[in-house]
Amino acid sequence: MRHSSGPVSQRRDGSSSLLKVVRRAIFRISNQFLVIHVRHLVGHAPVKFVALTADRPSRIRSPSLGIGSIMKTSSLFCVALLCGSQVASAQSGSADGANEAQNPAQSSSVSLRDIPLVAYTYSASGASFKTVGVQGYGIGMAARAQDSVIGGGGTFWASPLRRLTFVLDAQRNAARAFTPSAAAIVSVYASNGFSLGALGKFKVDGFAAGPDRDEVESEIEVGGLVSYDALGWYADVNAMGGRGTGDDGETDVEGRLRAGRAIARWLRLGVDSQVRARLAGPKYLPNGRTWDFVAGAQAIATNDAFFGSLTVGPTTTGLVTKNVGWTIVASLGGVVF
């Protein structure tokens, strides 16, 4: 019956060859999987110790899938899965944290991603998820041929849902009017430092208005927001339009711009500005023009959960003449994470 040993030996050789093919396939898949995820973790840097094993699987000479091979394969898969979970967690944090800026000059303390509104311009990313912030500010304005104005107010914001930020503000503005407002910012896209958002806002322009001083002037505004925050630079652009709720059909458009650079982990320097033009309704603004503006150099400093800002520059907003005045906005606030 010795002739039967030939087929048995062939079957063993065939099984051994099949096991070798399966083993090499498993090692190649696991190694390539590890290469991909490790490269993600280290920024696509070459991983020589992994690539060597992946490119040259024939170095593994074990005749069968023994305990050693199984342990090696399991180890590779465990490391690969660990790397994959880290990458997935980082990517999830980046996607879910669409409100987080990608600026290497920032510290782990409060940053612009946690402050949706400093002076004039809104951030498209809103505030970070589950953060609550508040700031108080003072406003000063001076111009020729009219009295100086001192005002101020406070802002409260919160992000109860991802990509959604509510902003409540109340102030006595440069026109000496009490103007509370409520706004919602929805961040619709965020990638590589760029953010796109939408704004909806209801604002009261003044109480005791109208001929009989028994009216409340209010306005509804909507707009699109674009922000960039990476590589130490930041910029926010707002395009907004508003229409009064009264019978006069007052319609305005606004453009707002904030831009600058982080020169230290705790300090940003730039500009903040706002331009408004009247499209319909009463033709002229209080300054006798169909448009007005306010702009200024801006410094923002952060420390742990607190921040402060100072914005100083020219203005025609709030003036009752065609002169150009100067305004200053100083704020101090904090954020709870």
Image (spheres, helix red, strand yellow):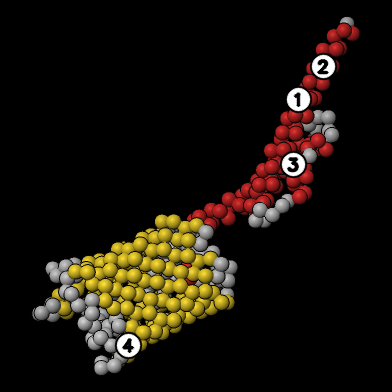
Q: Earlier in the sequence, mark 1 or mark 3?
A: 1
Alpha carbon separation for disc pair 1 and 4:
86 Å
Alpha carbon separation for disc pair 4 and 3:
70 Å
Q: Residue at x 17, y 71 (%)?
A: 281
Q: Earlier in the sequence, mark 4 or mark 3?
A: 3
Q: Earlier in the sequence, mark 2 or mark 1?
A: 2
Q: Is residue 163 left or right of residue 275?
A: right
Alpha carbon separation for disc pair 1 and 3:
19 Å
**Callout 3, which amino acid?**
Ala
Q: Is residue 155 left or right of residue 24?
A: left
**Callout 2, which amino acid?**
Gln
For the question of whether residue 130 can be seen, the reply is no
Say what secondary structure mark 3 lies in. helix
Q: Are marks 1 and 3 in contact (CB under 8 Å)?
A: no
Say what secondary structure mark 1 lies in. helix
Q: Give the class, few, some or many, for how many residues have Cα within 10 Å of label 2's Cα (few <14, many ≥20).
A: few
- The residue wearing badge 1 is 18
- State the image quarter where residue 186 is shown: bottom left
Q: Is residue 157 left or right of residue 94?
A: left
Image location (x, y in percent) of residue 58 = 81, 35
Q: Residue at x 25, y 93 (%)?
A: 145
- The residue wearing badge 2 is 10
**Could you say which is closer to the camera, residue 236 or residue 151?**
236
Q: Earlier in the sequence, mark 1 or mark 4?
A: 1
Q: Is residue 173 above or below residue 245?
A: below
Image location (x, y in percent) of residue 154 = 36, 78
Q: Earlier in the sequence, mark 2 or mark 3?
A: 2
**Could you say which is closer to the camera, residue 190 or residue 64?**
190
Q: Residue at x 26, y 76 (%)?
A: 291
- The residue wearing badge 4 is 325
**Callout 4, which amino acid?**
Gly
